[in-house]
Amino acid sequence: MGLPFVERIAAWLRDKRIFRRERTPTDKRALGIALYAGGLSYEKSGEAVGVSRQAVKDWFDRAAEYFRRLRRRRRRRVAMDEKVIHLPDGDAYLWAAVDLDTGEVTALLVSRGRSGLEALAFLEKVRRKCAGRLPRVFIDGGEWYPWALRQAGFDRWTVVAFGPRSAIERYFSLVDHRYRRFWERFPFRSTVESVLRWSEAFGGVHNMRRSLS
């Protein structure tokens, strides 16, 4: 996390008028978002910038808007995968897709199950971020993918363990690094919906960082 990254967050907050009021300086909000995304707790991030933990949580949640506003574009290659996440009332799955040419996280889904139906719902999200011919998709050997890919209109995919899929593995390693700060389980009262919003905010911050590279 460097100064240009914090400035990038601040510029986005200002340009898109994410906050209607300037009761708290935008630069302070940007720093709080960056500190939390970098690994500090809401409480520690708040202490660092002189606000409450709830304030930092509310600021970080707004980063989901950056992810959601990712524009539709031509994409040549996309890697995707899913990982188990632990919620207070049982396990769920986080699905993610990364554009191999830009490094952007293009789609996210949190589901209770992992089957062709969930894969199809996820692939429809990927499709909405693609223009023109659909990209080649790099996947692991999950049996839930082939049927879903055909149903969603993806006619080119490659099953591979390494190589092109390293981008999604790197992204998940970032998620894991941040996730471990929750003691391997999302906080009490977390739901599929709240974890999706958290994931979209984390993906938004990741994409902002990528925009500087």
Image (tube, grey):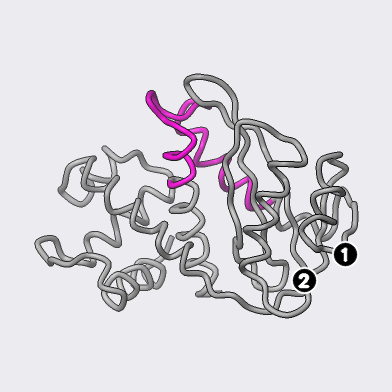
Determine the residue positioned at 16% across, 65% down. 25
Residue 125 image label: none
| Disc 1 from disc 2: Cα separation | 8 Å
Q: Are marks 1 and 2 in contact (CB under 8 Å)?
A: yes
User: Measured from the top left, where is residue 34 in percent x and y?
Assistant: 37, 56
Q: State yes or no: residue 151 in magenta.
A: no
User: Measured from the top left, where is residue 136 in percent x and y?
Assistant: 83, 67
Q: Assess disc 1: are there few (<14), some (14-19) or many (≥20) residues with their C-alpha within 10 Å of its C-alpha.
A: some
User: Which region of the structure is painted magenta?
Assistant: 170-197
Q: Callout 1: helix, strand or loop? A: loop
User: Measured from the top left, where is residue 72 in percent x and y?
Assistant: 59, 75
Pointer 1 residue: 155
Q: Quadrant of residue 111?
A: top right
Pointer 2 residue: 134
Quadrant holding the C terminus: bottom right
Looking at the rendered structure, the kind of residue marked 1 is Asp
Determine the residue positioned at 43% across, 50% down. 38
Looking at the rendered structure, the kind of residue marked 2 is Leu
